[in-house]
Amino acid sequence: MDLTEVIEAYLVESDELLREMEVILLRTDTTLPTDEDLNAIFRAVHTIKGTAGMFGFEATVSFAHVVENLLDELRSHTIQFQSHLTEILLKAKDHLLYLVLNETKGKIPQEKLNLGERILDEMKPFLSANVSQVPQKKQMSPEIQDQTNLKNPNKTNDFSPDSNANGIQSYLISFRPNQNVFSHGLDPISFIGYLKKIGTIISLKTIDQFLPEGKEYDPENNYLGFEINFSSEKDLESVQKVFNFIEEDSFLHIYPPGFTIEDLVDLSNQLPEEEIFLGNLWKEIHILNENSLLEYLEEIKSRKTGIPSASSSTTQTDMGIPNSSSEITEQNKESLKSSTIKVDSKRIDNLINRVGELVVSCANMNQLIGDADDPNLQESSLVVMRLLNEVREISLKLRMVPIGESFQKYSRIVRDLGKELHKDIRLITEGNETELDRNIVEKLGDPLTHLVRNACDHGLELPEERQKKGKPKQGTIRLNAYHEAGSVVIEVSDDGNGISKEKVWKKGIEKGIVYGELPDSDEEVYKLLFHPGFSTASQITNVSGRGVGLDVVYQNIESLRGSITVKSIPSKGSVFILRLPLTLAIIEGFLVAVGKSHFIIPMEMVLECLHFSDDHKTESNQFFALRGNLIPFLRLKDYYPCDSRSDISRENIVIVRNGEKKAGIVVEELLGEYQTVIKPMGSVFRHVKGVSGSSILGDGNVALIIDVPSLFERTVTIENQKLFSHRG
């Protein structure tokens, strides 16, 4: 049996559960966890343990079992949560993630098992002696037999008894596991067996009237239901917790003491069995007696006939728990609204690639149809193009994910670095709902990690220094994401020291990267920060000092067709601004031509197009006069090997924007907006500056996609080289 897909699902689910666990634990640094928080953490570990047990991953099961015991005592308030437990549970989460990812590949190394033992040793002082042991390799689920004939000698025949003098309460539990419950790795019998740990099963009746016969019976399906008369000193919430992990895969209704005949009739309307059958069954398990059974049957008859029964005036005790059929209906509606389908990301990537090919083919088809004198054919091609554009938009949205989930992991990084650097740091995230291409989000992990670490180490001061400057003792790092002009902007800011331009420039001179006086342009100074091997740290630590962080950031952002700029105010803080395209698959571009060569400029960077003549030039021949302002420009034919056409009588200039700056690109022809698929450059041309990719046009020709930020950086470099050679 091939378990590849099942194990992949196990890895994905475990990663999601552990990520949620970490988010909750990080909140406990400032506030005590609620019961809901503890239940959520317990569910995460319990689910991973159960699934790992199905595959025989013993190391994961053994470790998770002890962690589960600790969490169980916390959620039952046997022990109180302490701040030290946050650190221990975070270590446990990290080790559990390691086990989940690596035990699927083979045996866990002994040193890692020893690490797990040391983490468990830290837990043992908080555990009771009887729950700190690791489970045996083989452990069978408890068997639950039909207990219809069991009777409690202290039980009276009164209907729905309240709590007695000893605090014992009686509950009616209607439990109908879904037919596919086994496929989710859940065993209903084990949940019923767990009830014995918190109380006594007075009577239990197994419902098997829907059990099929012959070929219709599937041993992998569940066909049984259970009606249980249960007594316990525990409250309703404690009884409900027993079924926390199977509640979503079953119909479950628990009535506490004080329920009425009307409540039972409402319940019978929600259950698949007949009302009379249920009434007799409840009598068998001592929920109803002879008199109350007659009242129950009268109430059913009165509801069907519309004639009020004698028992309809029975006072209903408000127990504060939902039991109306209308509420069940609302829950069903809500579950329908939130239904989702998990699809392998590779399938989505394949779909988008095919849609991209369709865009190219359709453009070629439209060009051929445009030359034909057939109005009907042209109209049909326009309809196809419109539908294709809609399919393209839908397929691209399939790969868009909110960036907030990616932001969450930096809370742990900030927390750990704060402790290591002896700094009090708070992380604030904004724009979590901003959507971005999943592929870009994945590749943003390393750049954002470097920027956050840089802010913690270089940006923020020690608490004592901040207080001397009149700042709050706690430093703040802020992650913010938002859409702007067809791009996504991500800002990483801090309220720390800021960047000393003098210090950066001096370091650049020492390394032989630059020389001369400190320039007025902040951008020219801050570019040094991204130079390979550049660091202003006075000493090498575990966090910084080797000059590899921001260099990696720049390379990764550039590979994503993005740009990065820096702003800083001394003693106030710094902000790194990343601008990225929404997607890496398809580009909305503006098609231009120089001679026979075609180029595509990203549409989100294009501001306007103008006629260009020698009258617009300044004396320096490097600036264009635009409504009283001078902006730099360049000619594409000066940077790419393309011959001018002799029949072109005029040139045009495309005004583009890169962040807050404007510039001009002089071309010969303006061919208009063009929607195209991005093709990566071959390995030979991968490092060519000023080009981010290529595209195949409808006529089969290749057009280069211009990397505007890189192109203008290259222009500045060439001009500086000319200036320095002139000085020399």
Image (spheres, rainbow, N blue to C red):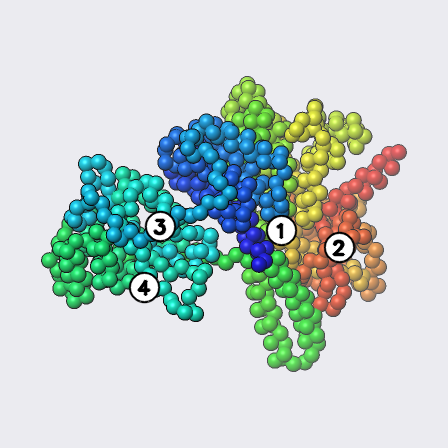
**Which marked residue is nearer to the observer: mark 3 or mark 2?**
3
**Which marked residue is nearer to the observer: mark 4 or mark 3?**
3
Between the residue at mark 3 and the residue at mark 1, the CA separation in whole angstroms equals: 50 Å
Between the residue at mark 4 and the residue at mark 3, the CA separation in whole angstroms equals: 18 Å
Earlier in the chain: of badge 1 and badge 2, it is 1
Earlier in the chain: of badge 4 and badge 3, it is 3
- How packed mark 2 is, by other alpha carbons closer than 10 Å (few <14, some 14-19, many 20 or more), is some
Q: Residue at x 47, y 34 (%)?
A: 133
Residue 439, disc:
1
Q: Quadrant of the N terminus?
A: bottom right
Determine whether the residue tagged by mark 1 lies in a helix, strand or loop: helix
How many tags in the picture?
Answer: 4
Foreground pick, 341 / 697 = 341
Mark 4 = which residue? 209
Identify whether 330 is placed above or below 496: below
Residue 168, disc:
none
Determine whether the residue tagged by mark 3 lies in a helix, strand or loop: loop
- How packed mark 4 is, by other alpha carbons closer than 10 Å (few <14, some 14-19, many 20 or more), is few
Residue 257 position, x and y percent, is 22, 45
Between the residue at mark 1 and the residue at mark 4, the CA separation in whole angstroms equals: 51 Å
Mark 2 = which residue? 681
Q: Are marks 1 and 2 in contact (CB under 8 Å)?
A: no
**Which marked residue is nearer to the observer: mark 1 or mark 4?**
4
Residue 99 position, x and y percent, is 57, 41
Q: Residue at x 67, y 26 (%)?
A: 541
Mark 3 = which residue? 144
Earlier in the chain: of badge 3 and badge 2, it is 3
Q: Are marks 1 and 4 in contact (CB under 8 Å)?
A: no
Q: Residue at x 37, y 56 (%)?
A: 177
Direction left: furthest residue: 310
- How packed mark 1 is, by other alpha carbons closer than 10 Å (few <14, some 14-19, many 20 or more), is some
Determine whether the residue tagged by mark 4 lies in a helix, strand or loop: loop
